[in-house]
Image (cartoon, coloured by chain):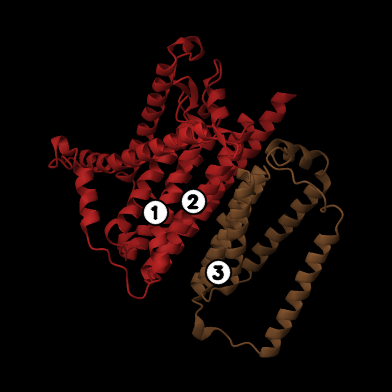
Amino acid sequence: MTLLTIDWLLVLEKLILIVVIILASLGIALYTTFAERKVAGILQDRPGPNRAGPFGLLQPFADGLKLIMKEEIIPNTSNKILFVLGPALAMTAALMTCAVVPWGDKVEVFGRTVKLQIADINVGILYVFAVVSLGVYGIMIGGWASNNKFSLMAALRGASQAISYELAMGISLIALLMTTGTLQLGEIVKQQQAPGHLWNIAYQPLGFLIFLVCAFAECNRTPFDLPEAENELNFGYHQEYSSMKLGFYLFAEYVNMFISSAIMATLFFGGYDIPFFDEAAHASMGNWLAVLGVISLMIKVVIFIFFFMWVRWTIPRFRYDQLMNLGWKSLLPLALANMLITGAVILWLHK
Amino acid sequence: MSATQILFWILSVVALFSAIMVLLSKNPVHSVLWLIAVFFSISGHYILLNAQFLAIVNMIVYAGAIMVLFLFVVMLMNLNKETEPQKNLWLKLAGVVSGGCLLMILVSLIRQASEVTNKQVLLKDGNIGLIKNLGKALFSDYVVPFEISSVLFLSAMIGAVVIGKKN
């Protein structure tokens, strides 16, 4: 089946994979909103949402329905196309990263070997980095098109925060790349899976810490949620938004949280590697091994998401100057030192 | 037509259309956004040439960092039609003539250059754009120019700090 010299079965396979992964990301993000409210409830000693369905399990759907049913308001003076483009860009940038995350090992379907990863490209980590740096546009365009001073201020804050923390994030990744020697995410997971090789967190603890803090900042999560600081900026960059456009902005944050958890698990915690279990010795399990791997990755992701929430309901918001000081005066020098030390150690070990 | 060719035509049309829109948009913010679209389509061209590293770095550096700063400045300056200075007609004419001259020189150069004419472009099979080969070339054959350009960047950085310290 070749037309235009394209393998259409491969296209179909990838299309199914893309649809499944995007729907799964959205579904997990949907229930993350519910989990967030439950975790907040537990941390504040109250039950949390418990009215819609058993244990309040239908709450996310009730929230979504409420957002969709609300009136769509586009401010009269705003730039209409860009006003709609803002949330769309935020959502697209949030979902684009899941293309390079290896969600699991290969599975056999109807005699075809299918990799549980949309694209294992050569420059995987750089791709993640490029998409992260595009996430700023959703905030900036939305804030500017709202034609509201508070929105614009919040958008500028958000953009400068993202730019500042991207630097430390990139440099902490360079140190990781020095130890792995590859940019391919699939390859990085394979290396961590190999017997006798520890997870990357053991080789790059400081790099992981810097990456974690920067991930919080890039996701606009507390303690770095200055772009939506309601006591200073009313509601931040999405103040003029209503209905599902607001929903997209709020939702993009949860998708970002899920994807960055998956990236952290992949880079530093072995991805779909099952701890204390030799995958190579159990190759006869076939597809079930891949399923177990996916479950293992998901457990790691859920732990990270819980950590995100735990921090949100524990640590208060930073002031703007504290945020900039932390980014430029603490994290950036630390990341640089980490990179230099890693490079020196690698050179020394090779001799 | 192969798939690569179709992609090439789509990307070229998008790139040229966005580039024209950069010039034609009245609103500077729209111009910046169209310019971002240009960078994306050019990144697509790089991917067609199998220069993945170049494509991604083009996206990170230009679309991700430089254009964000452009957008930053344009948004803060609050440029609109009323504040736009009316330019003299002769100045406009001079601009058209000099721009046309530049275009003519570029086109004639490309038409005459023996290095580009009658040469097949390496599509998707060329490996020089992959990060491993690029790194080896940069750090062995071209290490001196590479280091010199790093000195250039350092001096630019120091210059920025000096300008920032003045106030």
Cβ atoms under marks 2 and 1 closer than 8 Å: yes
Q: Amino acid at mark 3?
A: Ser
Label 3 belongs to which residue? B31
Contact, CB < 8 Å: mark 2 with mark 3? no
Residues flagged by tags 2 and 1 on a common chain: yes
Nearer the observer: mark 2 or 3; the answer is: 3
Q: Chain of mark 2?
A: A
Mark 1 is surrounded, within 10 Å at the Cα level, by few (under 14), some (14 to 19) or many (20 or more) other residues, namely: some
Letter of the red chain:
A
**Residue A66, image x and y in percent?**
20, 53
Amino acid type at image mark 2: Leu
Q: Residues within 10 Å of mark 2 (few under 14, many from 20)?
A: some
Residue type marked 1: Phe
Work out whether residue A50 or residue B93 is closer to the camera in this orientation and state it: B93
**Would you say residue A330 is visible in this rendering?**
no
- According to the picture, the residue beneath numbered tag 2 turns out to be A326
Mark 3 closeness class: few <14, some 14–19, many ≥20 residues within 10 Å: many
Q: Colour of chain B?
A: brown
Q: Which residue is found at the position 32% from the left and 68% from the top?
A: A74
In depth, the one of B39 and A266 nearer the eye is B39
Secondary structure of the residue carrying tag 2 is helix
Say whether marks 3 and 1 touch (CB < 8 Å). no
Kindly indicate the quadrant of the structure image that contains residue B127. top right
Describe residue A64's horizontal placement relative to residue A131 as left or right: left
Depicted A338 relative to depicted A292: above or below: below
Q: CA distance from mark 3 to mark 1?
A: 35 Å
Going from N to C along the chain, the mark reached first, 2 or 1, is 1
